[in-house]
Image: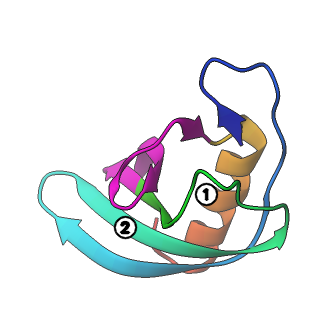
Amino acid sequence: MIQYGLGEYSHWVFSDVHVDLMEEDRWKNLHLSFELEKGEIPEGLTDPSLLVVIDQGTVMEIVLQNEGCDSEYKLTDMEKEQLITLLKDKKLI
């Protein structure tokens, strides 16, 4: 996880994700809550969740949200790969 504007980052290891809401139109939007096996949620994130935008089976965007809005944090490429693997395991992609 990287905070915008800062060079420091850490890596979360996800243990599980839960689909809170799935909207389907031309694009599939997954709103996810998650559990961490490793890593800590920073104090600035009070209600973190993830928005995953999928188009025809391809993940187009993964946005780390706080209280349902975009946050000042984003996932690292390693975290995005982990998340995509978890979603494939759950047959959501």
Residue 77 at what x, y percent from top left?
71, 37
Please name the residue shown 84% across and 61% down the image: 39
Q: How packed is label 2: few (under 14 Cα within 10 Å), some, or many (20 or more)?
A: many
Q: Which residue is mark 1?
A: 84
Judge by depth and name the residue closer to the eye, 43 or 19: 43
Work out whether residue 52 or residue 10 is closer to the camera in this orientation and state it: 10
Q: Is residue 35 above or below residue 56?
A: below
Q: Please provide percent x and percent y for residue 68.
A: 33, 59
Mark closest to the chain's N terminus, 2 or 1: 2
Give the residues drawn in magenta, as a range: 52-74
Q: Between residue 23 and residue 4, name the one nearer to us.
A: 4
Majority secondary structure of magenta residues = strand
Q: For marks 2 and 1, give the CA distance.
A: 14 Å
Q: Position of residue 42 (x, y in %)?
A: 70, 54
Q: Which amino acid does the dot numbered 1 rest on?
A: Ile
Asked whether, in this view, residue 30 is left or right of residue 18, the answer is left
Q: Residue at x 64, y 42 (%)?
A: 75
Q: Residues within 10 Å of mark 1 (few under 14, many from 20)?
A: some
Does residue 50 lie above or below 59 as drawn?
below
Residue 84 sits in quarter: bottom right
Looking at the rendered structure, the kind of residue marked 2 is His
Quadrant in the picture for the N terminus: top right
- Taking the spot 65% from the left edge, 32% from the top edge, the residue there is 3
Q: Is residue 80 left or right of residue 78?
A: left
**Residue on which the image places disc 2:** 31
Say which of 87 and 51 sits in front: 51
- Quadrant for residue 45, please give it: bottom right
Q: Are marks 2 and 1 in contact (CB under 8 Å)?
A: no
Asked if residue 42 lies in the magenta stretch, the reply is: no
Q: From the top left corner, tell me how far across and down residue 23 is, in percent.
A: 20, 68
